[in-house]
Image (cartoon, rainbow, N blue to C red):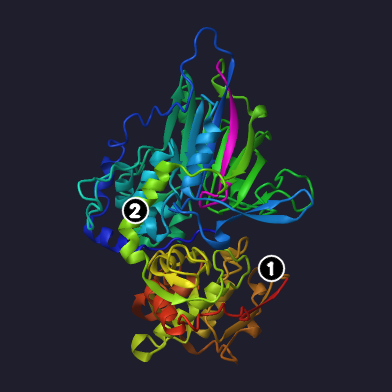
């Protein structure tokens, strides 16, 4: 499930144009005015006369927006809700026009309201935002009155210099300003990256924390991304940076805030877990066998000092409101609001004016659906229309036709129909001898960012796949590589899907036609890939033979926990993944003979 970043084509240009991290040093100095004393003051004013001892602070939070300004299409835009009778209903959700309305409605009657995010606001974005280096999303977040966010791994997709530009403003170093007479202003909220330092100086890349203040109420926010970011971002994106342990970092800055008299602290962590149910309204604290939450966030939460009062998390795109005990054994709230702006979390923090701390026993939290049956926020509609007009000449070009939805991101199966289409497109484009001579292709599941949806998204007509829709599926524009791997390395790579760093949360590669094997989920570790069943075009893989293997440059660098794929030799660099995908759609579909969803019969799953 985890979001797997790769390189936006733009990062190549940005990094070529920018000399290392030179511009980042000025980042802290150039933080938005008042970033250390936030508090948009959503409603309400200074109190008069006697102040009650406690005040309820509303914390609204969300995570993993990924530039989804328009409602995400198909199954990727649904939220699962368990009904009273036990059935599960899919509810269409998300889109910043609705998210703005939801947040503004929630703030009414709450004079103390602060809005925070758990990272991955940008990156792997649909064309509407990605084409413009995510300037539209930063502009939308400013309009949503976001107070603070942690960085996620995707904030590093285009490197630290580009992240500095998103914070501080200024037009793109290569593409310039997108609108005549308009300069990009940057984020008017701080991006926090407490556990990211510059290798040369050891100093933080961005502010480690910020303090939100209103009428004497002070809440500190510490922001971190996952320590493993370098394993899931291309090397250029994290060049010159060091990523530190989440728990140690948060505890260090919690002590610093405490010394400064800030006793109420929230950690924004771009790392998460997996609840036992995918329904947003699942009771994560129910006591049944197998209930609750698993994944990296559990150990992180157990290690974070009791000085921290609540954890806002992300990265896994799951929805949960759980309590996990802190090191002193007391329950503490850990929340995540799915992804793509489909949910927001509303947490009540009761602030004690005498101790300046949160009364932890009274912390309440719930996730709410950003439904699409509420009024759209007119300012967000205007923003979307403005950028859509700029994107239209590129976005609306037809690339091919499909006969029905082809699920990718929205599929929970190990083998996804859209994964098969993408892998086949890569194999077909790189099989000719002069293009690399590929015999098999692998696609990482996290790189498939959407479904191909049959219903028209605009005026193109049902079944038409536009460039914008294809880009939304494959937004990184990775260059393809074809390399030599031995049969033994191929087998090891397939076993790495379910072992090593991927054992707890398997990453099942999408494979091109001709490659078949059995995945036995009743076994553990590498044994889950049944080695004797791996065949290419009906023949068992020969451990000693050399095979030509196609994959994107992220996988070819050993990304996503696949060191075996990083051992390839005799590399040929081919076209981009998006170009091959579009070429395949053009070659295999017409208006009268659209592409049908392929069968998913390459991986035999035993459960």
Name the residue at 63% across, 60% down.
Answer: 504
Q: Are marks 2 and 1 in contact (CB under 8 Å)?
A: no
Counting other residues with Cα less than 10 Å from the Cα at mark 2, is it few (<14), some (14-19), or many (20 or more)? some
Residue 149 in view of the camera:
yes
Q: Residue furthest top?
A: 49
Name the residue at 60% across, 92% down.
Answer: 538
Residue 387 disc label: 2
Expressed as whole percent of the image width and height from the top left, the position of residue 288 reads 79, 49
Q: Which residues are magenta?
A: 337-353
Residue 524 disc label: 1
Query: First in sequence: mark 2 or mark 1?
Result: 2
Helix, strand or loop at mark 2:
helix
| Quadrant where the image shows the C terminus | bottom right
Name the residue at 61% across, 64% down.
Answer: 503
Name the residue at 52% across, 85% down.
Answer: 487
Residue 132 in view of the camera:
no
Q: Is residue 136 left or right of residue 108?
A: left
Expressed as whole percent of the image width and height from the top left, the position of residue 9 reads 33, 65
Classify residue 514 by image quadrant: bottom right
Expressed as whole percent of the image width and height from the top left, the position of residue 555 reads 45, 70
Q: Is residue 323 above or below residue 499?
A: above
């Amino acid at each position: 499930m985890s979001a797997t970043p790769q390189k936006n084509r733009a990062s190549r240009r940005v990094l070529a144009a920018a000399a290392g991290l030179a511009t980042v040093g000025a980042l802290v100095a150039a933080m938005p005015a008042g970033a250390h004393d936030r508090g948009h003051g959503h409603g309400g004013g200074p109190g008069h006369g006697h102040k009650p001892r406690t005040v309820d602070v509303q914390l609204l939070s969300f995570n993993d927006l990924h530039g989804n300004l328009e409602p995400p299409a198909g199954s990727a835009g649904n939220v699962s809700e368990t009904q009273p009778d036990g059935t599960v209903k899919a509810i269409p959700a998300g889109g910043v026009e609705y998210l703005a309305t939801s947040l503004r409605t929630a703030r009414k009657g709450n004079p103390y309201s602060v809005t925070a995010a758990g990272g991955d606001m940008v990156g792997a974005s649909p064309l509407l935002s990605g084409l413009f280096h995510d300037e539209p999303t930063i502009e939308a977040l400013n309009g949503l009155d976001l107070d603070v966010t942690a960085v996620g791994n995707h904030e590093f997709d285009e490197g630290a210099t580009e992240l500095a530009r998103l914070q501080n403003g200024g037009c793109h170093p290569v593409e310039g300003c997108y609108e005549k007479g308009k300069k990009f202003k940057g984020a008017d909220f701080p991006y926090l990256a407490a556990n990211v330092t510059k290798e040369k100086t050891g100093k933080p890349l961005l502010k480690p924390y910020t303090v939100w203040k209103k009428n004497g109420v002070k809440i500190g926010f510490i922001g971190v991304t996952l320590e493993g970011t370098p394993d899931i971002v291309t090397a250029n994106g994290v060049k010159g940076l060091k990523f530190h342990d989440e728990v140690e970092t948060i505890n260090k800055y919690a002590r610093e805030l405490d010394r400064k008299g800030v006793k109420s602290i929230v950690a924004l962590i771009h790392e998460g877990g997996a609840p036992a149910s995918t329904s947003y309204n699942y009771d994560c604290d129910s006591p049944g066998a197998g209930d609750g939450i698993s994944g990296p966030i559990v150990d992180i939460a157990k290690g974070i000092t009791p000085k921290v009062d609540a954890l806002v998390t992300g990265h896994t795109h799951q929805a949960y409101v759980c309590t996990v005990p802190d090191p002193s054994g007391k329950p503490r709230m850990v929340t995540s609001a799915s992804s793509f702006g489909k949910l927001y979390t509303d947490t009540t923090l009761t602030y004690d004016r005498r101790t300046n701390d949160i009364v932890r026993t009274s912390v309440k939290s719930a996730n709410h659906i950003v439904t699409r049956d509420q009024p759209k926020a007119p300012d967000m509609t205007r923003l979307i229309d403005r950028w859509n007009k700029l994107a239209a000449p590129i976005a609306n070009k037809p690339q091919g036709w499909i006969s029905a939805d082809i699920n990718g991101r929205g599929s929970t199966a190990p083998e996804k129909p859209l994964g098969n289409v993408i892998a086949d497109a890569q194999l077909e484009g790189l099989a000719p001898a002069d293009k690399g001579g590929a015999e098999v292709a692998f696609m990482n599941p996290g790189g498939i960012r959407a479904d191909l949806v049959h219903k028209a998204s605009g005026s193109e007509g049902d079944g038409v796949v536009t460039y914008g829709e294809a880009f939304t599926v494959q937004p990184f524009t990775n260059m393809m590589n074809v390399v030599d791997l031995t049969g033994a390395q191929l087998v090891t790579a397939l076993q790495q899907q379910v072992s090593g760093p991927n054992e707890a949360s398997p990453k099942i590669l999408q494979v091109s036609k001709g490659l078949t094997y059995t995945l036995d989920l009743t076994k553990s570790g590498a044994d889950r890939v049944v080695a004797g069943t791996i065949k290419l075009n009906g023949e068992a893989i020969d451990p000693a033979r050399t095979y030509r293997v196609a994959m994107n440059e992220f996988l070819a660098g050993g990304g996503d926990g696949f060191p075996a794929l990083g051992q390839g030799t005799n590399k040929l660099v081919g076209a981009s993944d998006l170009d091959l995908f579009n070429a395949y759609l053009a070659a295999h579909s017409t208006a009268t003979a659209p592409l049908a969803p392929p069968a998913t019969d390459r991986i035999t799953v035993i459960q």
